[in-house]
């Protein structure tokens, strides 16, 4: 799964490919070794749509409304881009909290 996420990220942000196009998605799947025709079939019949929507709903209920979003210790949500110093401060605060 990591390869697919990375491939999608590079395709969109580095190469400017249209990842909302099913043919482009199928091409990306093939580039990482998945079956292109099977990828097109999955996209066409939306085989995993129910599971994806359930995951999406779960994380929205956890308070995530934008990306990036990071959850620490399954209970502390940090939304938006944070610099290194902010993350260091957040991690220090969490480390100092009693369990």
Image (cartoon, rainbow, N blue to C red):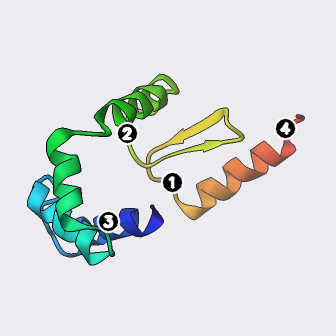
Task: Give whichever of 48, 96 is nearer the camera.
Answer: 48
Q: Is residue 14 left or right of residue 51?
A: left
**Location of residue 17 by image quarter:** bottom left
Residue position for label 3? 9
Image mark for residue 96: none
Sequence order check, earlier mark of 2 and 3: 3
Secondary structure type for disc 2: loop
- Identify the element where label 4 is drawn: loop
Q: Under tag 1, what secondary structure?
A: loop
Q: Work out whether mark 2 precedes mark 1 in sequence or the reverse, and give the earlier one.
A: 2
The mark that comes first in sequence, 1 or 3, is 3
Q: Residue at x 32, y 70 (%)?
A: 7
Q: Say whether marks 1 and 3 touch (CB < 8 Å).
A: no
Q: Residues within 10 Å of mark 4 (few under 14, many from 20)?
A: few
Q: Is residue 20 above or below residue 64?
A: below
Real-space Cα separation, disc 2 to disc 3, in angstroms: 16 Å
- Give the alpha-carbon distance from disc 1 to disc 3, as whole Å: 19 Å
C-alpha separation, residue under disc 4 versus residue under disc 3: 35 Å
Residue for point 52% across, 27% down: 62
Nearer the observer: mark 2 or 3; the answer is 3
- Foreground pick, 31 / 76: 31
Q: Check residue 66 in the rendering and tell me which mark sits there, or answer none.
A: 2
| Cα distance between the residues tagged 4 and 2 | 26 Å
Identify the mark nearer the N-term, 1 or 4.
1
Kindly report which numbered mark, 1 or 3, lies closer to the viewer in this rendering.
3
Residue behind mark 1: 82
Residue 64 spot, x, y in % from top left: 45, 33
Quadrant of image for the C terminus: top right
Callout 3: helix, strand or loop?
Answer: helix
- Looking at the rendering, which quadrant does residue 6 occupy? bottom left
Q: Which residue is mark 4?
A: 97
């Amino acid at each position: 799964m990591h390869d697919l996420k990375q491939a999608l990220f590079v395709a969109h942000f580095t190469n400017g490919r249209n990842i909302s196009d099913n043919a482009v998605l199928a091409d990306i799947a093939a580039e990482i070794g998945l079956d292109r025709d099977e990828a097109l079939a999955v996209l066409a019949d939306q085989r995993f749509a129910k599971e994806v929507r359930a995951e999406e709903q779960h994380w929205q209920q956890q308070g995530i409304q934008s990306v990036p979003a990071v959850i620490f210790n399954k209970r502390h949500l940090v939304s938006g881009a944070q610099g290194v110093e902010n993350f260091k401060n957040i991690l220090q605060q969490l480390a100092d909290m009693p369990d």
